[in-house]
Image (cartoon, helix red, strand yellow):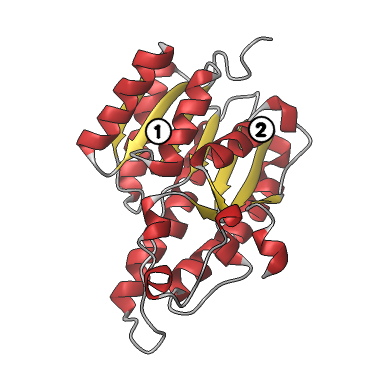
Amino acid sequence: MEPRFRDKVAIVTGAAGGIGAAIVERLAGEGARVVAAGRSEDTTRAVAEKIVGQYGGETLPFVCDVGDEAQVAACAEMALQRFGRLDVVVNNAGLMTFKTLAEWTAEDWLKVLRVDLLGAAFFTKQMFLHAGTAGGAIVNIASVHAERTTANAAPYSAAKAAVLSLTRTASIEGRDRKIRANAILPGAIDTPMLWENPNLKSGAETLDKRDVGQPRDIAAATAFLASDDAAFVTGASLAVDGGRLAKL
């Protein structure tokens, strides 16, 4: 079977580890040329070098603050200059912090919204500016928090809910351009973000081990939605949570 992403070019944000690194690996393993965008130069480069060593091909690191529109535009421009096209954007970069509603400041809100919402919006814009006549695919990594949430995470939950709305709008505006947009709602995934959650550390929230997925689970769903196998799927939100959302 021919690799699903042969000759395709993808940008993946939040690529320095966890879910993002797993997505880069999956797309590269299926033939994509990938720009791995992350905040940390050292860890992003390490991810790219590991994947090139494992799969060959071209995976390029790019240091990018997704909340800075100029840096986002530079990332897309680098992909175009190096590879000549842009076929897939995966908006995975995310920030989750914890305070009560009474404690959040405007600066706190904006810090989370810049990464979790505006970053996705800025890269969505780049896809609309640069997708070719064959169109493209946007996959937004949202969260089950967009639909069911917990205390002390209001900006994150609000941003992820807004990402679902952004996804629907992109699917509507992208239809005539053959640009598909879909969202994934991960549940509890085995990453540092999960285990650093103070609600888990305090015991206020508990997890059944069956409710904890792996980054590769999100990567597999992303590869499906980004591929031609999902050619008739757009504007959808796919929960990848081991059934946890159904119980909440």
Q: Residue at x 73, y 33 (%)?
A: 230
* Quadrant in the picture for the C terminus: bottom right
Q: Is residue 1 above or below residue 25?
A: above
The reply to whether residue 32 is visible in this rendering is: no
The reply to whether residue 143 is visible in this rendering is: yes
Q: Residue at x 56, y 72 (%)?
A: 149
| Cβ atoms under marks 2 and 1 closer than 8 Å | no
Q: SS at mark 1?
A: helix
CA distance separating discs 2 and 1? 22 Å
Q: Which mark is residue 26?
A: none
* Between discs 2 and 1, the one toward the N terminus: 1
Q: Looking at the picture, tell me which residue is in the foreground, 248 or 61.
A: 248
Please indicate whether residue 171 sits to the left or right of residue 79 in the image: right
Please indicate whether residue 169 sits to the left or right of residue 51 in the image: right
The amino acid sitting under disc 1 is Ala
- Which residue position is annotated with label 1? 76
Q: Which mark is residue 224?
A: 2
Q: SS at mark 2?
A: helix
Q: Is residue 206 above or below residue 126?
A: below
Which residue reaches farthest bottom? 102
Which residue reaches farthest front? 209
The amino acid sitting under disc 2 is Phe
Q: Residue at x 45, y 18 (%)?
A: 84
Q: Is residue 23 above or below residue 206?
A: above
Give how far across and how far down residue 90 sits, in percent: 51, 39
Q: Looking at the picture, tell me which residue is in the foreground, 76 or 12.
A: 12
